[in-house]
Image: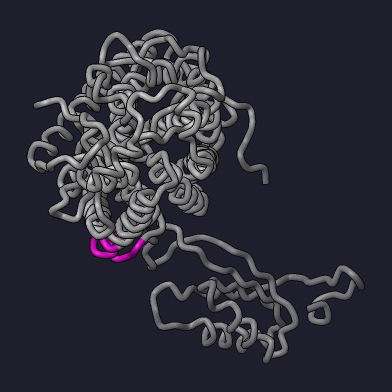
Amino acid sequence: MKLVVAIIKPFKLDEVREALATLGVQGMTVTEVKGFGRQKGQTEIYRGAEYSTNMVPKIKVEVATTDALAGRVVEAIQQAANTGAIGDGKIFVLEVAQAVRIRTGETDDVAL
Amino acid sequence: MKLSTKIGLGLGALGVSALLASPSFAQAAGPIFNPTPEQQATMVNKGDVAWMSISAAIVLMMSVPALGLFYGGLVRTKNMLSVLMQVFMCVSIIALIWVCYGYSMAFSQGDTPYVGGLSKAFLAGVSPTTFAATFSNNVYLPEYVYIFFQMTFACITPALIVGAFAERVKFTPLMIFLVLWATIVYFPIAHMVWFWQGPDFLKDSTAANGLIWGWGALDFAGGTVVHINAGIAGLMGCLVIGKRTGYGKEPMPPHSLTMTMIGASLLWVGWFGFNAGSNLEANAFMGVPFINTFVATAAAAVSWALVDQIVHGKPSMLGAASGAVAGLVAITPACGFISPMTSIILGLLVSPLCFFFVSTVKNKLGYDDSLDVFGVHCIGGIFGAIMTGVFADPALGGQGWVDYTVFPAGVGAYDMGAQVITQIKAVAVTLVWSGGVSFVLFFLLDKTIGLRPSVEVEHDGLDIAEHGERAYNY
């Protein structure tokens, strides 16, 4: 099993969700996050007082998937979240040791 | 300069002039000179009373909640209540001292042209059968109505000051300052600029005028009395108290420009009471200050947004709100004297000037006028006061002035150069008097009971430390 963690631009969330849904992905976890990478922060100006914020708001999407599907999940996110500009985000793939569905106690691939 | 008293044309005066054109009629039904209170009682207009009462109520709305929200939105969450409370208590306390002695100091006859006496302290002698003059011969307001209308001006003016040192002042010393400032600065300046005997008495009592009124300065609704007065006091306060801890090093962005927009918008609405209400009558002339207030503000909001667009590439909501307030400030002294088209020019010009002060000058000189009380109110007020002298010229579509030293009052000849010099003199007296007294008061309070909270209190925020509550509990 793999955990696919993607940091994406907030406005791309719906497209990523739809792309994953067409692959048959049944669940995801979404978090509003802030961070920075190569994309510069924003500058806010209040009556001439400039404040630069170096943290940029992003969305973190986490999808747990079977090994077989993981490659296509990564590919789908990469295509759906792509704008071609700096700041599109990153995708990380992690190994998952175990998964449990709380309601039934089912484990691993069946629990995803 | 000869003693000539100038004030915007009341329609009554125009009507009187028209009456004079037909001598037989004027002799038959001329206005009464020096009317008795019994005669004045028959010269009260129900429309005027209704309009002035509504005006007073919406000028109160300019302080609470409008000024509170406009200022409050600009501070950080931890200081929101401190600003709201400073404004709210300022209004409440000043209202009380206004009826105790403020009205008497501002609007009763004194021994000098600088300040009134105490003959009307605790509203002595005031009743529903006493009356206050308007700008038209033989038109009177019930004195109570005049008292509470002027009370709302006294309430909002000291409240304007608190923005200059927001987020770093102790509550109780500030309240003491505001009471002293109202007593030593506001009431005398209001007397000097606005006190006179009224159009039915002036011919025989020119010596009784307030000093600046006697000079013939034009200030329709309080450019000098309210905005320059409060603006320079604010600057003195922020200089004596010093910068906020971390100013220029850590971000101090406004916590809610939504509230700032609501506050600025309510100020705009309330300002019709402030400016058009200052006409004191619901006559046809009242439309002049009303429409001028509307369009000057709109023009100033547009021009600040344009400056934002040019300088920063984006038109900001804070800029539009700041521009609207700058426009309101600038049109305040001018509103009853100039035309709608020159009002637009005034509005278009004031925003770039204030923008320059709040962004460039403030940063260059390094003073921390937190909410730009000096940059917007004092600078905008000075600009408005001086431009009043220019645009009031009938040659530029202005309304000119009325000579009340003759009875009935008539239109006087306009001399733009002399008028501008008179305007500058009025501005200078206000700057020196308010600036000087404010500096001394701040300095003495700072050295005795202290004006500034500890760095720890400032860090934690004034809401918890001074008021024991938070604006927002999530």
Evaluate whether residue B234 shows in this view: no
Residue A84's spot in the image, x, y percent? 41, 83
Which residue occupies the foreground of this view, B364 or B394?
Answer: B394
Which residue occupies the foreground of this view, B454 or A64?
Answer: B454
Q: Quadrant of the N terminus of chain B?
A: top left
Total numbered labels: 0
Instruction: Kindly identify the residue that appears in the image at 35 percent across and 11 percent down.
Output: B444
Instruction: Kindly identify the residue that appears in the image at 26 percent across and 50 percent down.
Output: B355
Left or right: residue B399 versus residue B326 is left
Does residue B311 belong to the magenta stretch? Answer: yes
Q: Is residue A62 above or below residue A44?
A: below
Residue located farthest toward the right when viewing the structure as drawn: A104
Residue A101's spot in the image, x, y percent? 84, 72
Residue B376's spot in the image, x, y percent? 31, 42
Left or right: residue B364 versus residue B35 is left
Instruction: Kindly identify the residue that appears in the image at 45 percent across and 49 percent down.
Output: B264
Does residue B137 belong to the magenta stretch? Answer: no
**Predominant secondary structure in magenta?**
helix
Instruction: Kindly identify the residue that appears in the image at 83 percent across and 81 percent down.
Output: A110
Residue B219's spot in the image, x, y percent? 27, 36
Evaluate whether residue B1 shows in this view: yes
Quadrant in which residue B77 is drawn: top right
Coloring scheme used: one colour
Q: Is residue B166 above or below residue B414?
A: above
Q: Which residues are magenta?
A: B306-315
Which residue occupies the foreground of this view, B285 or B315?
Answer: B285
Which residue occupies the foreground of this view, B377 or B456?
Answer: B377
